[in-house]
Image: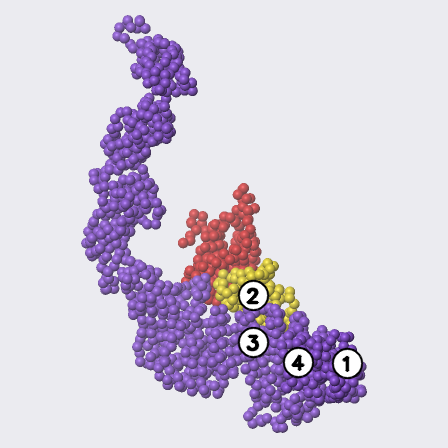
Chain colours: A red, B yellow, C purple
Amino acid sequence: MSRQASRASESKKMNSELFTLTYGALVTQLCKDYENDEEVNKQLDKMGYNIGVRLIEDFLARSSVGRCHDFRETADVIAKVAFKMYLGITPSVTNWSPAGDEFSLILESNPLVDFVELPDNHSGLVYSNLLCGVLRGALEMVQMAVDVKFAQDTLRGDNVTEIRMKFIKRIEENLPAGEE
Amino acid sequence: MAVCIAVIAKENYPLYIRSIPAENKLKFHYMVHTSLDVVEEKISTVGKALVDQRELYLGLLYPTEDYKVYGYVTNSKVKFVIVVDSSNTALRDNEIRSMFRKLHNSYTDVMCNPFYNPGDTIQSKSFDTMVSGMMLQAC
Amino acid sequence: MSPGQWDLPPELCCRPMAFVALTGLDVVYNAVHRAIWDAFCANRRADRVPISFKVLPGDHEYPKCRTKRSSYEWYIPKGILKTGWMNKHLNLVPALVVVFYELDWDETQWKEKQSECATKVEIVRTSLQGRNTKVAVVLIQKKTPLPPGEDVVASERAAALCNACDLSGKSLFVLPHTDHLVGYIIRLENAFYEHAQTYYYTEIRKVKSHKEFLNKTTHQLLFVRHQFKIAFFSELKQDTQNALKYYRTAYNLVHELRAHETNMLEIKNMAGFINYKICRLCFQHSIPLEAIAQFRKHIDLCKKKIGSAELGFEHIAWMSKQFQSFGDLFDEAVKLGLTAIQTQNPGFYYQQAAYYAQERKQLASQLCSHEASVSYPSPDPLETPNGMLDFYGQRPWRQGHQSIDPPDPEKEKSGILALQLKERDVPHSELIIALLSSAVAQFKKYKCPRMKSHLMVQMGEEYYHAKDYTKSLKLLDYVMCDYRTERWWTLLTSILATALKCSYLMGQVKDYITYSLELIGRASTLKEDQKSRIEKNLIKVLMNECPDTEPECDPAAVKTAQNLWADRVSLAGNNDFIIEVQDYVPFVQCKARFLSPSFHVDVPVQLHIYLKADCPHPIRFSKLCVSFNNQEYNQFCEVEEPYESNDILEPSGQGNMCLVPGKTRKYHFKFVARTEDVGKKIEITEIDLMLGNKNGRYMFLKWRGGGGDAASPQEALQASRSFKRRPRLADNQVDWDSVSIQANTMVISRIPKVSVQLHHEPPALTNEMYCMMVNIESQEDSLIRDIKLTVGLKPGQDANLTQTTHVTLNGTEVCDDSHPALLHDIFIGELHPGQKIVKPVYFRCVTTGSRIFLVHVSYMVNTSVESKEIMCKCHKDETVNIETVVPFNVAMKFVSTRFEHLDRMYVDIPFLLMTDIPSASPWPLKLFSSQLQLTSSVVAVDNLDSQIEEVVLQTGESASECFCVKCPSVTSNTSGVTTGRYTISWKRESNNEKLPVVCTSVTLPCITVEAIPLYVHADLPSFGRVRESLPVKYLIQNRTSQVQDVEMSVEPSDAFMFSGLKQVRMRILPGNEQEMLYNFYPLMAGYQVLPSLNINLLRFPGVSSQLLRRFLPTRIFIKPQGRQVDDASIAAA
């Protein structure tokens, strides 16, 4: 209980430009080190996954949300609480599939991509792919296997940035969440 | 309305030059290049009052018959040059200042793009758009 | 009209001065008159009045004054300012005419002379024809005049003369031609000046008076004219303030005139003149900003007043002239002291004048390019009766005409045609270049290097248009490197293109090739098709054919060029060119890289040369060679292909001699370094790439050092910062940006295959002969020869260590200080593979501390590299850090015979020397013996044999000795008596019997010796027993030479009863000893305090009892009563 309270008050401010530049340096270094954009996307996803499995703890401690009853609730929590807490933006939740297992997050702005312009030879690069990994890893720790990918990206010419999340299955408690 | 806008690196080579298409591009290149003499003189710290050193806006560099050339230098010694038509008397000093501020801000954004290598020529589309706006708008 | 048609007339540009005519002087034949004239005109210093003098004959006819106009009603002016007017008032119509007449006051024929003079004056007056010019008379006299008032005759005659000549008294002067001629002349001048000023003042008033007759409708021109005249007269009067005022008014009025095409030129002309005057006066008055403002206003007002469109070039020429003359005025002011700055200096004006001159040329070529059939109109419409116009700025064929439309359209046309044809003959380029040149000089002065470069480019281009290709090329070439250094590629490309045209038109092959190199390279901003064309031409030149013409060249020049090229083609020989490219940005880039910054001499040296072409089409080269600082390696680094075909574009048998644009080619070279180069650097001095072949033309592109050109350092820097991924290429392909230049490599010696092992037992002990065994084993495959050993203290350590370390090979005796700290080049011999040799080395370290020792083994061995036998010198170093420690410390002290501490010794009283040797050595020490050498102040009481002979001390053990000595006498210096030395000979306990013994010697401490008057000592058994009598004998020795009275008393003690004298006084003779016997009876057992003695020396009251009884024992051990066998003794106790 006391840990929760202390964490909630303890959100130190950091300059967002430093964060954006750090992320940018990370992506360009990956571009330099790996042969093609696909590889880079994969690496970003892996890194995001590692962040996600840890971030979920912090999130649950800070936000004190309870268990989600259904996928819709999960979506709302992700959009209204998680994104707001960590990135300061509130995407909107739309485009639910009829079965209720897929939805889109529409981001009007994305702090990761301030000032970024993709050069022409990197059209296959999913710049913010880290976010997909984060979401995937975080949800895995609460027993949900999801598939996350970018459907639209302002960096590649689209009007908005859209993340598509699809629920795959519930993970059984005694099976370890697998990742290479 | 600017007829030519240029961004010059601190080693004095051009990072970006654009001029209105109607005119001979070489003429503007030369104009910007020669205006560097005045810029260099202004920013050299020998015997200048302290106040001048902090001022980024350099003002009217020198008048030619048909054009007025203005300069601005950042603390990292990157120079911006704006050339306007002499006949455009409506353009006031603080309007020029705000054009430079816009240029400076856009330039900073370009620098923050992780895919931009400092020292390369500027090829950012958003920078181009901003400059186009400055060259077309009637001031 | 002459080329100087736009020049300002000289009468406008000069500084107006009052004009005074001198008559009656015969300067040719009359010496006096000559002297007078010289005094007027020779060496006029700046402080003399501004008057221009002229000698005229007495009957000279002055310009007729026109009749005064009665009214202006019907007068319509034909122009603004007559061309002759200024000249008239500067040079023709004087303000004052002076009549010189030789007449002394005492002239005998006074009356005749007087009337002659009057006649002369009358003649002058007549010839002035009604003008207001003043007349004055100067009498040249031989005698000095007397002070005024004294010469009555003079004043009388003067008055008479004035009357006769109808002059006022102020107009009559006297000039004695004596010694102070110049002084008199100056006074005369000043007077003339006043008269002149009055004249001009009158003239001004005259002109001003016209004003009331003028009306604005018809007399517009006159308003201007009159203001101008007033201003000009003011100038003549030297009233420049007012002159400025009137000129300004005139200027404003000029622009109020109704202007149309026909009179535009006249208006502009006048405006230009007045502006010139205003600006110059402003500069003279040191208000340069006003001059600049006026000029600005002038230009703004006149810019749009173009006039006739067909003669548009005239307007531009006029504009150019305005700027040029303002520049001249500005420059003149600077020369007189005005300070100009970088952003406001004459250079800008010359530059603008040049710009207008360029526009003029362009417009002229448009407007004046009539066909050859069109001939110059006849009669010449530009002809004027006397070669001059009536009014400034009017057209010769319609002078005086002021209406809007020209009077005669035909004449108008022919006039225009004439002007156009004349314009064609104007050397525009010359004018432009002269203006640019002036501008360049100015900008150089005001530190505008880039402006200067830009103007030089313009000059170069102008020379090109003027077909002076040599000068053009010289300028452009000079200026290119500025733009190259600052990386303004667009500008550089434009300059290169012009330079290429020049070199083509001059048929200069080398320059043509050099410029082409850059124009098809990566810095050039030309489009692909242009680059392609130039590359094709370059290849043609290399195949000794004529290149195609450059586009947009003058056809006549092209024809000449083609002939020149044809000549070059047929010219045999002189067909090779060497071009150093590291200062340019050529289309081929080169980088050289040694594979490693150092190579062992037994490993072949390898290097790669990388080439990359940036031109549009592939190009083949015929040779690549590399030169090194050691020329012998050059032969190994060549790629050459002899081929017969002339076509460079044809693919060759050797595919890799062709450079494909964008791809990097790698050439690999290998050679064996020479053994002499071990320890030296191999450097690439140059790389040569040959293009073309010996059948046609060929050229060498030469890079100095390891490659790189004018743009590559910046590019390398950018590439290193870039995020761009390194493309994964096939194995034989290389990414250009990832290659960095390594232009030199060091040759280092071969790795030795020998093992050097050191066996020793540290730490060393100071002064011992420390033994180290050096084991050398050869692990080479062949015999090693000439093995030399250098062993000792490693150089570079503390200087003290060098003094205190000694090395020797001879271990049988202790080496002395003459041995060095480092032994060089000890010859060891030879070793076969696997053979071993052991060499013992001995060190002696005098001081403690850490020392680094070096063992260096060098040898020669034969080895083969790339199937070549070479002999290598190898060496192996071993270093070892050896600590030196002290083996032991000697502690010495002097004590009394009773082992009690003594701080002073007493003469002749024995005391003990105790020495203690604790071993601090980690090794067992064998002490062989010790020796005590006493000084004369101390003698031994007992024998001094060593008590520690052959003692082995383990670590921590201690050896001690004790000697009994005494000081026989006291010297004058009773403190700090030296006692002697104590020497120990020892060595480390080891198996090596041959190791010598080390002797360590220490100095014994000094002592203080005192004499004592009385020596009291006791003789008593070593112990007592309770209730058993203990006899004690006290001996008192008188050590003085006098008889001593001694008082002695025995203190009672609880532990003893005694019998004997309790108190006694005695006398002891010198040198004698007195015995006192006591019987003590111990009462208690234990270590008991003996009864103490109180001794007083009556002669030495200062000597205390304590002192005297110090040699007496204070305690004695009393045994308890012994257990007797029989009971009787117990009962007795």
**Which label sits in the foreground, 2 or 3?**
3
Image height check: is A71 above or below C97?
Answer: above
> Which SS class for mark 2?
helix
Front one among C149 and C20: C149
At which x and y percent is residue C999? 27, 36
CA distance separating discs 3 and 1: 60 Å
Residue where numbered disc 3 is placed: C438
Q: What's the residue type where badge 2 is placed?
A: Glu
Say which quadrant the C terminus of chain C sits in: top left
* Badge 4 amino acid: Ile
Residue that mark 1 sits on: C158
Chain bearing mark 1? C
Evaluate if marks 4 and 2 touch, with contact meaning CB atoms under 8 Å apart.
no
The residue at the point 33 percent across, 63 percent down is C682
**Residue type pointed to by label 3:** Ser
* Image depth: mark 4 or mark 3 in front: 4
- Dots 4 and 2 on the same chain: no
Q: CA distance from mark 4 to mark 1?
A: 22 Å
Instruction: Judge left or right: residue A174 versus residue C817.
Output: right
- Have a look at marks 2 and 1 and say if they share a chain: no
| Residue receiving disc 4 | C36
- The image's mark for residue B41 is 2
Of circles 3 and 1, the one toward us is: 1
Q: Is residue C594 above or below residue C361?
A: above
User: Is label 3 in contact with label 1 (beta carbons under 8 Å)?
Assistant: no
Few, some or many residues within 10 Å of mark 3 (<14, 14–19, 20+): some
Cα separation between marks 4 and 3: 43 Å
Closer mark to the observer between disc 2 and disc 1: 1
- Which residue is nearer to you in this view: C498 or C214? C214
